[in-house]
């Protein structure tokens, strides 16, 4: 199975439009347009899953740089999500243990 990232989507792009763009290259198992959790509006990118790796590679080659909805698509193989590590520190640590300048 090939998981494909599709970026620079027009906010008005529907899942069916995206599916129709990928289907000429093979079987599309799933289309998922990522939306903002607060507004429900598209965030401008999606993931497409295709059942066959070679078909997915053909779709990537054909659709990367293609125009859809007046925007140039960025299409490539999706990378696995990395874990968000907790960040130490913060922005307001400066000035501790110092005498104020008056």
Image (tube, helix red, strand yellow):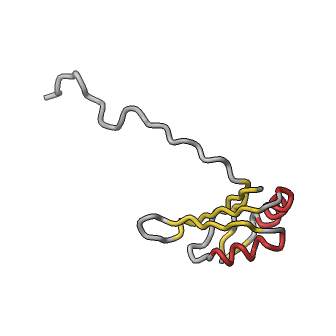
Horizontal side of residue 38 vs 99, given as left or right? right
Q: Residue, x 80% and y 64% (percent of image)?
A: 59
What is the number of callouts on the image?
A: 0
Horizontal side of residue 6 vs 102, given as left or right? right
Q: Residue, x 49% and y 71% (percent of image)?
A: 41
Horizontal side of residue 84 vs 13, given as left or right? left
Q: Is residue 87 above or below residue 101?
A: below
Q: Is residue 52 above or below residue 96?
A: below
Q: Residue, x 73% and y 54% (percent of image)?
A: 77
Q: Percent x, y for residue 53?
A: 82, 56
Q: Percent x, y for residue 18?
A: 69, 73
Q: Percent x, y for residue 46?
A: 63, 64
| Residue 76 location, quadrant | bottom right
Q: Is residue 101 above or below residue 38?
A: above
Q: Residue, x 25% and y 28% (percent of image)?
A: 95
Q: Pick whichever, 51 or 56, lies toward us.
A: 51
Instruction: Quadrant for the C terminus, please.
Output: top left
Instruction: Quadrant for the N terminus, please.
Output: bottom right
Q: Pick whichever, 3 or 73, lies toward us.
A: 3
Q: Pick whichever, 96 or 17, lies toward us.
A: 17
């Amino acid at each position: 199975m090939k998981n494909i990232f599709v970026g620079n989507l027009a906010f008005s792009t529907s899942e069916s439009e995206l599916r129709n763009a990928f289907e000429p290259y093979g079987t599309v198992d799933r289309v998922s347009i990522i939306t903002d959790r607060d507004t429900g509006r598209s965030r401008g990118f999606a993931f497409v899953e295709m059942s066959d790796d070679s078909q997915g590679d053909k779709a990537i080659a054909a659709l990367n740089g293609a125009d859809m909805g007046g925007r140039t698509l960025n299409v490539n193989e999706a990378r696995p999500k990395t874990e968000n590590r907790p960040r130490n520190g913060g922005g307001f640590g400066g000035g501790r243990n110092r005498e104020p300048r008056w």
